[in-house]
Image (spheres, coloured by chain):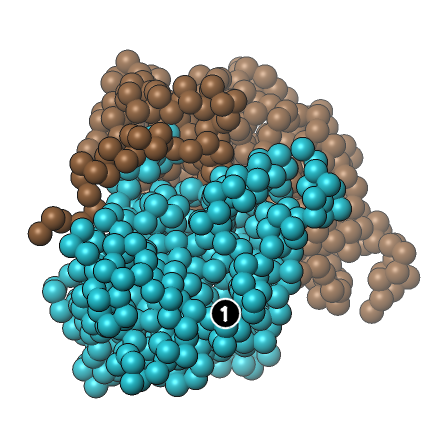
Chain colours: A brown, B cyan
Amino acid sequence: MSLVDGQYNGVPLSWLFPEEKQGWTGYVEWEKSPDKKRVANGILKSQKFSPIPEFQDGPLPKTNPILIGHRWKEYHAALGLKSIVEFSWKTVLKEKHDMLHVLDFPYNGETLPKYILGDGKITQNKHFFVRNHGGIPDIDPECFELEIGGLVKTPVRIPLKDLKDPSKFPQISITATLQCSGTRRREQIDEYPGDGDELINAPWGEGAIGTAVWRGVPLKKVLKIACGGVLPECQHLEFVGADTYFKKYEVYNYAVSVPWRKVRQSEEVLLAWEMNGEPLPKIHGAPLRVVVAGYIGARSCKWVCRINALAEPSFGPVQRQEYLYYNQQIGKHNVLISNGFSIQAMPVSSAILSPKTKDVVIHDGSIELKGWAYSGNGNWVERVEVSPDGGHVWYPVAQEDMTQKHYYAWRLWKIEVPVDAEGWLEFCVRTWDSSNNTEPTYVRSAWNWDLHVTSSAHRIKIYSVNRSKPRTAMRLKQLEDMGESLEPISKPLEFTLEKFEDYEAASQKYPREPRD
Amino acid sequence: MSLVDGQYNGVPLSWLFPEEKQGWTGYVEWEKSPDKKRVANGILKSQKFSPIPEFQDGPLPKTNPILIGHRWKEYHAALGLKSIVEFSWKTVLKEKHDMLHVLDFPYNGETLPKYILGDGKITQNKHFFVRNHGGIPDIDPECFELEIGGLVKTPVRIPLKDLKDPSKFPQISITATLQCSGTRRREQIDEYPGDGDELINAPWGEGAIGTAVWRGVPLKKVLKIACGGVLPECQHLEFVGADTYFKKYEVYNYAVSVPWRKVRQSEEVLLAWEMNGEPLPKIHGAPLRVVVAGYIGARSCKWVCRINALAEPSFGPVQRQEYLYYNQQIGKHNVLISNGFSIQAMPVSSAILSPKTKDVVIHDGSIELKGWAYSGNGNWVERVEVSPDGGHVWYPVAQEDMTQKHYYAWRLWKIEVPVDAEGWLEFCVRTWDSSNNTEPTYVRSAWNWDLHVTSSAHRIKIYSVNRSKPRTAMRLKQLEDMGESLEPISKPLEFTLEKFEDYEAASQKYPREPRD
């Protein structure tokens, strides 16, 4: 077998893996084409690809993008799909603004805290985090149709324009937070390195979460109106995306599923084409995506082109082999697929966005903190508490300092915490949801091999400088007079700390050793 | 004022700062020469020197030497003392073997754990840690004399050969541990950055400690026999070294002091010329050094050439402005010299030397740990305890697994700890001394601005792989069969984790969602 100049055994790759449908650029159908899949897998297994980069051992590069997805690009190139890679990055540049690019391909980018706090409870589309698992397809909405099959009374194909016709399907809007289960993963990595992944499990900070108003039709209504309902054996609804996914040198379409029981709650599983009153951006799944409120973001399948009613969860690797949650003692020495449970509904969690860890904060006896708090599955945020001392004293955020309650959305919060102490302090936040769930105390309390669900109380280190203390005020004045800066605090001062007379008087009055 | 080609205002530096005495190469007398000091300080204040390197923000360079002492070298060069820098590094290469060079000049090097554990309770001279504050002088023992003055009945000068004459002064040997109060500083830096210093406060690991048999004469006896004793006002004995020290662009000889009360305990303060049965190496203070048993290493003045009996502690900057211990809330915003207390006697502390943090340990249900335990000031180590679970369960080290008790020396220990659990575990050690002192629980419990005295329970992260577990044994076999390695653990496995039939059976038997 040989792969030379875009030809495989003399056959152009574009013949082997053609675009399936008129107007559906960047879409290859794998799941329905076992022969094509077999050839592609053969090609992948015959090639060498770049090693998976090791980024857990040291600090992350200070570049933006932070990580480069060489391997995933090479997988695409090996199948003649390089144009998907190029279109994807072009789309990032067009649709996104000022993101922290955690991984360039598949594109993963997080919202900077200033946009979360500045935008209010709704995250603007251009700032909304992205966790893609493959390239971005480019599908003409005019040509788009959704296929529904499996355990339904009547399999159908619905053109997008019919789906969007309010006389055919009732439309609703929901305010829902989407969150990657990798949010705050860096805290787990800092504690202990965990599993690597060929699709880089991005080292997320606190910004892999966002809230939008999504508009579309409830999947439940579409199943009922278009298909006459699901058959009694139906337990899960599978969503198949138009993007291409890889797992251990095999190729797939992205596929995940959610329980029928979840879909039956009309307002929870939406087929959406509008985000914050604007057409859904391509990077977020245009022309059509699923929004599964209260669940891990991975279930909200983008570029959804097929829905299958199944008797059990999807066998897509993302559903069965990824996003698993293990017992803490599980790792490379013993991990099995069947000993992790699938992450679906998201737990209560929160984060401090301002100040940032290691900040030097000059204040007059109190410090303002801001952040987000969220709980999944219809549990809403009831109370947010902030501790200025590592988790001993907890101050509650006032109701008026939190954004409004939603069943499926976060609350942004702020609080002014009295702070007397100076030097290095450890602040943390925890949230109580409407079912009285709260967060684990430490990262270690819930560390997990795949580094998912960092929901422990978020901790930051602040160097507190309390200007209301006379000695501190004096030092700040000294620094100003000498033209020296307080930061970086680890830079030693050029001037002598104390007048000799003062020092001498103190050491005479309180000598180092007892008198007798 | 101009400094050109080794000339200062046209006068060669070698005329300004000559070597004082025949056979005393690399020694300049500063403390008795205020005029010379003034000229030198003028030169220093007129120059620009390299900035102090920032090493607290990221991981340390993987080089050896880790840090380069540009600034201290430039201070020496500015005073025409570059030859001291050169002689010092030559001496390192000659007298030391296989050290972790933490800072090249002034030389700071730590003993590798393998030599601590391999050498038994005595650390070989060539492996013994070094914390120098200046360059190494090269003094001919034939020419050396010790001057004793201040509040003594009769000031004297004693040639080294007289001091070593057992008919004149009684000799003793003591087994004593010396420890830099910066030992394990890296743990404090990892927690929060602290003060920088123009003499780089070296980022020590667990090896800035060692034990030797020191031979010499008790200072008490010398004071009595040679000087007729000290005057009643004497409270401290000051030791002046032949090395040159700098503080905020001023020049000094190294000078420190210890209480007369301490010196009165004959076996505690020694003037030593022999280390482990060999002549004292130059790098350790030849021809003569002080050994202050149970105290911070900084008081065991090397190249001691003058001893002054004083009514109060030495005004040397090392004594008064360095090695201070602060309240935890003290930092750059408010630190004064007088609000730190001088570190003298060392507290109880211990360290795990094997395994190392982040090691993957494959075992059959128990793991052997080894390390050191020490307490200062004549308190000896009574009990060492190791926890395999972060500090909940504590296993005591058996007496037969510790080296013998000494009043002034560490005990090396080992223990086999039962370990069932797998994955990331946190081990820690703590020690109880003969006064029932033990160690703070966490680094945070006793973090300090100057990053001294890291005596909290030493914690390491171990990735436990328990081969006696069937599933683990199976995975190890799988890895062997596939020619894959378990390490690095963060590298994903190339093979599928589980046979499809096994996975499918498990997911049928225990489905993700309830039946009703």
Residue at horizontal 69%, vertical 54%?
A: A71
Does residue A442 lie above or below B303 as drawn? above
Q: Where is residue A435 in the image (x, y as percent from the top left)?
A: 22, 34
From the top left corner, tell me how far across and down residue A80 is, in percent.
Answer: 80, 50
- Residue at 24% across / 72% down in the picture? B225
Q: Where is residue B293 in the image (x, y as percent from the top left)?
A: 27, 68
- Vertical arrangement, residue A467 with respect to residue B95, above or below: above
Name the residue at 24% across, 39% down: A507
According to the picture, the residue beneath numbered tag 1 turns out to be B283
Image side of residue B218 versus residue A491, left or right: left
Quadrant hosting residue B19? bottom right
Work out which quarter of the rendered image holds the N terminus of chain A and state it: bottom right
Q: Could one spot residue A52 in this view of the protein? A: no
Q: In this view, does B97 lie to the left or right of B417?
A: right
Q: Residue at x 23, y 83 (%)?
A: B404
Q: Report the side of A63 relative to B98 (left or right).
A: right
